[in-house]
Image: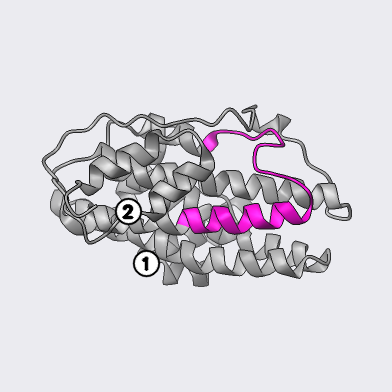
Amino acid sequence: MNEADLRVEASKALAECDPVQKMKRVQSLNLNGSVDASLTLEPSMGRPLKPVLVSPGKVPTRGLSSPEGKAMLLHALAHIEFNAINLALDIAVRFDSLPLAFYTDWLKVAQEEAYHHALLCDRLKAYGVSYGDFPAHDGLWQMAQRTADSLFARLALVPRLLEARGLDVSPAIRTKLANAGDSESAAVLDVILRDEIGHVAIGNRWFGVLCEQRGLDPVDAFAECLVKYSAPEPRSPFNFPARERAGFSPAELQWLLHLEQSQSGSVKT
């Protein structure tokens, strides 16, 4: 890896179809390697044969009182993490002419997402299940495709919208798993939440850099991206402590609070 360009190696990892080989390629990335930020690359996302992709409403679910229900939930989480690997690789490969720190930030994210995926795959094994055994949906990657022409929109709508949603829902999922007797999987959720706060913080930091360069207000710019790309509005309840740790500004947290009150019908005038 000393002579190989890091973004080129990342593009190979992105194109890899086999999940196990993809994780090996990601974990082998040397973040101290060279980066040619001027290199224009054509990202190609490798898809495994499984899982079968269906619409969100057709992803099977069961109650967590059964082993199958726990396995289905863990499979859905493993799929999210697998997509997150590709998202982190894609943003580093797709967008050129950026500072070195941008690329090392996102490739570090890719490595941590690969670690999360591996942790969840290990938990699936405890239920006699492998990644790909259940259908899954493709919402995260669809947003990546919609924002392929704009780094600004990608930062706004993937880490700051879709991945930030994970900060909001992870604690409740963790509690459900623990209450269902799966303390090992609950502990994995603790690791994922800890790291995802850092991932969203990276998205916030680079979104803030672009807003400052363009003289834009982050709150207004984010709201405009939601409309321009027909993205779903952030949904309450919000994990305000985690979002604050992830770098959402007081003004952004206030905007989310107002949104939460509006969604619950309790806005004070």
- How far from the left and from the top, in percent, is residue 166? 55, 55
Q: Nearer the viewer, mark 2 or mark 1?
A: 2
The boundaries of the magenta stretch are 113-139
Is 266 colored magenta in this rendering? Answer: no
Q: Is residue 8 visible?
A: yes
Q: Nearer the viewer, residue 162 or 60?
A: 60
Residue beneath the point at 71% across and 52% down:
124
Measuring from the top left, give residue 32's x and y in whole percent. Answer: 22, 61
At x 52%, y 41%, the residue is: 19
Q: In whole angstroms, how far apart are the C-alphas of marks 2 and 1?
A: 27 Å
Q: Earlier in the sequence, mark 2 or mark 1?
A: 2
Considering only vertical position in the picture, is 216 above or below 201? above
- Circle 1 is placed at which residue position? 247
Question: Is residue 128 a member of the stretch shown in magenta?
Answer: yes
| Observer-nearest of 34 and 82 | 34
Q: Mark on residue 29?
A: 2
Please name the amino acid that badge 2 sits on. Answer: Leu
Image position, residue 83 (x, y; %):
50, 42
Residue at 23% across, 40% down: 95
